[in-house]
């Protein structure tokens, strides 16, 4: 089978680990060249001609513009923007916030999980328009269901679904915009720094899941390939592709969880 992304260039945020890393590696395997954008250096052993990395903060307009400029300088074009970088609220309850904590934590989480997507998409827009390219965001089961995150994470992922649909409407027919909505996946997603939260730990067990398995980051990568490929070009925009292993059918079972953990 021919590579599905042969000749395309993709910029992936949050590409140093987790879903972003799995997507970047799968894009390479499918023939794409990749610009990895993360706060940490995203190194790769092998395929140096097809891989470049920029360190920066998705909350910064200048850093997003620098990442796009580097992709264009290194590879000559940009076909796909994957907005994926995110943080988690460790399922902090609404009552658990003081007003001052809520103020700071909202600004931090939404700046990464929502504004970071918008800034990246805006920085990439002209280049994507030139190639009739596409945007793929990482949403979550939390974008449609309560209980899989705290109040801030749930609200942010609902916002991602909304901006996916609005940008799909505004940018058509030149740029397609879609999202992948994973269920629980153990990615080590960082918590909110202003609350001194570390990485989330714990999560459901295979017995909690309808498919009796915990998905890994690489299990979702094929969905990003499909939405970025020419195979979906005539049919997919404004789509939020739910891949939650049936979690939403059953709903969360927090009583069986040892500790809060990330949900995509």
Image (cartoon, helix red, strand yellow):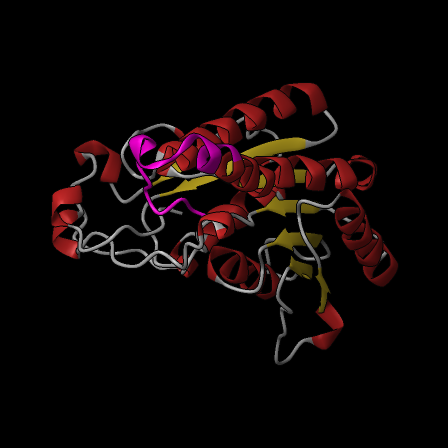
Magenta highlight on residue 77: no
- 84 and 178: which one is in front? 84
Question: Residue at the location (35% across, 59% down)?
Answer: 216
Q: Is residue 256 above or below residue 142?
A: below
**Picture coordinates of residue 54, whole percent (x, y):** 73, 62
- 122 and 10: which one is in front? 122
**Picture coordinates of residue 227, whole percent (x, y):** 55, 41
- 190 and 27: which one is in front? 190
Magenta highlight on residue 89: yes
**Picture coordinates of residue 229, whole percent (x, y):** 60, 45
Question: What stretch of residues is rendered in magenta?
Answer: 87-103
Q: Is residue 20 above or below residue 134?
A: below
Please indicate whether residue 145 sits to the left or right of residue 7 in the image. Answer: left
Which residue in the rendered view is the most extreme toward the bottom?
45
Question: Residue at the location (19% across, 48% down)?
Answer: 211
The total number of labels drawn is: 0
Residue 236 visible somewhere in the drawing? yes
Please indicate whether residue 29 sits to the left or right of residue 8 in the image. Answer: left
Question: Residue at the location (16% across, 41% down)?
Answer: 253
Question: Residue at the location (20% across, 52% down)?
Answer: 204
**Picture coordinates of residue 23, whole percent (x, y):** 53, 57
Please indicate whether residue 15 sits to the left or right of residue 98 in the image. Answer: right
Asked which quadrant contains residue 154, the reply is: top left
Residue 1 visible somewhere in the drawing? no
Asked which quadrant contains residue 32, the reply is: bottom right
- 184 and 260: which one is in front? 260
């Amino acid at each position: 089978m021919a590579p599905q992304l042969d000749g395309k260039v993709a910029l992936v945020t949050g590409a140093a680990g987790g879903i972003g890393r799995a997507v970047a590696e799968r894009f390479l395997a499918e023939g794409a060249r990749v610009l990895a954008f993360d706060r940490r250096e995203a190194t790769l052993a092998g395929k140096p001609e097809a891989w470049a990395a920029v360190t920066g903060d998705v909350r910064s307009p200048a850093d997003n513009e620098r990442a796009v400029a580097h992709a264009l300088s290194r590879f000559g074009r940009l076909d796909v923007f994957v907005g994926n970088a995110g943080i988690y609220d460790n399922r902090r309850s609404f009552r658990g916030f003081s007003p001052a904590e809520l103020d700071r934590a909202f600004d931090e989480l939404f700046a990464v999980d929502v504004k970071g997507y918008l800034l990246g998409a805006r920085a990439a827009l002209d280049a994507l328009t030139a190639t009739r390219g596409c945007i793929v965001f990482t949403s979550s089961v939390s974008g449609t269901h309560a209980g899989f995150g705290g109040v801030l994470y749930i609200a942010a992922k609902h916002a991602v679904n909304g901006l996916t649909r609005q940008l799909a409407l505004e940018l058509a027919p030149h740029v397609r915009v879609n999202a992948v909505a994973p269920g629980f996946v153990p990615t080590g997603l960082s918590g909110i720094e202003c609350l001194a939260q570390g990485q989330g730990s714990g999560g459901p067990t295979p017995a909690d899941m309808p498919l009796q398995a915990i998905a890994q980051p690489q299990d979702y990568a094929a969905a990003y390939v499909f939405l970025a490929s020419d195979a979906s070009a005539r049919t997919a925009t404004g789509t939020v592709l739910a891949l939650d292993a049936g979690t939403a059918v059953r709903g969360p079972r927090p009583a069986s969880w040892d500790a809060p953990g990330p949900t995509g």
